[in-house]
Image (tube, helix red, strand yellow):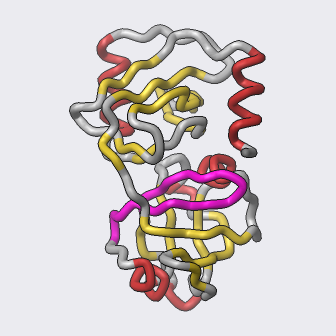
Amino acid sequence: MPEFEGKIQLRVEDIERDALAEGIARIDEESMKALGLSEGSFIEIIGKRTTAATAYLGEPKSEMKNMIRIDAYTRKNAGVSIGSLVEVAKAEVKSGEKIVLAPMGMQITVDKEFKRYVKNRLLSRAFTENDLVALKILGQPIHFVVVNTLPKGIVRLTNRTHLQILNKPLSLAEEEQVSANRLT
């Protein structure tokens, strides 16, 4: 496992289906120890761009050496694919003062109940600007993009975070900018 000043390099693999869209990463015990992590710690995943996930031990342990198992959303947020090498580090996470989400490709109705539901589902997760987020609502996935965070960097959604959910999707130009930002 190559190490670089508090970072390790791991090969990306797919995570089990029941962890889809949960913002988690599974890594081996040796990698967890090398980074000083315990289960539930936040990690920074650095590919073509940087994103965050919550680290948990992978199973079975013998098959996990030097790999990180993440879902398609986390891979997209990091700008990587299965088989890619990523750098992984213990994340410096700040409590989010404000997080702004916009729906992708559709207009939605945002009321207090909807906002409460989304906040409860995303509570304690970490995000970076331009991350894609998926939630199942009435059995259907709804995709959001993190438009803005305060402060900048990796932020955690807490009970005190002001969560703003826009009811309109980004314009085509704004979506193109988000896509471009994912690659820089």
Q: Quadrant of residue 145?
A: top right
Query: Within the magenta stretch, is there residue 42?
Result: yes
Q: Residue at x 63, y 47 (%)?
A: 77
Compared to 111, does 10 lie above or below? below
Residue visible at 73% across and 27% down?
A: 177
Which is more toward the observer, 156 or 20? 156
**Depth check, front residue: 41 or 152:** 152
- In the displayed structure, would residue 172 be above or below residue 69? above
Q: Is residue 112 left or right of residue 92?
A: left
The kind of secondary structure the magenta stretch mainly shows is strand
Q: Quadrant of the N terminus?
A: bottom right
Place of residue 182 in the rendered image (x, y in percent of width and height, measured from the top left): 69, 42
Depth check: 151 or 117 in front? Answer: 151
Residue 93 vs 176, above or below: the answer is below
Give the farthest residue toward the left. 160
The region drawn magenta spans: 39-54
Where residue 146 appears, x then y in whole percent? Answer: 53, 31
Q: For the point 35% across and 20% down, which residue is it?
A: 115
> In the displayed structure, would residue 26 be above or below residue 54?
below
Q: Residue at x 65, y 64 (%)?
A: 14
Query: Within the image, what quadrant is residue 176 found in?
Result: top right
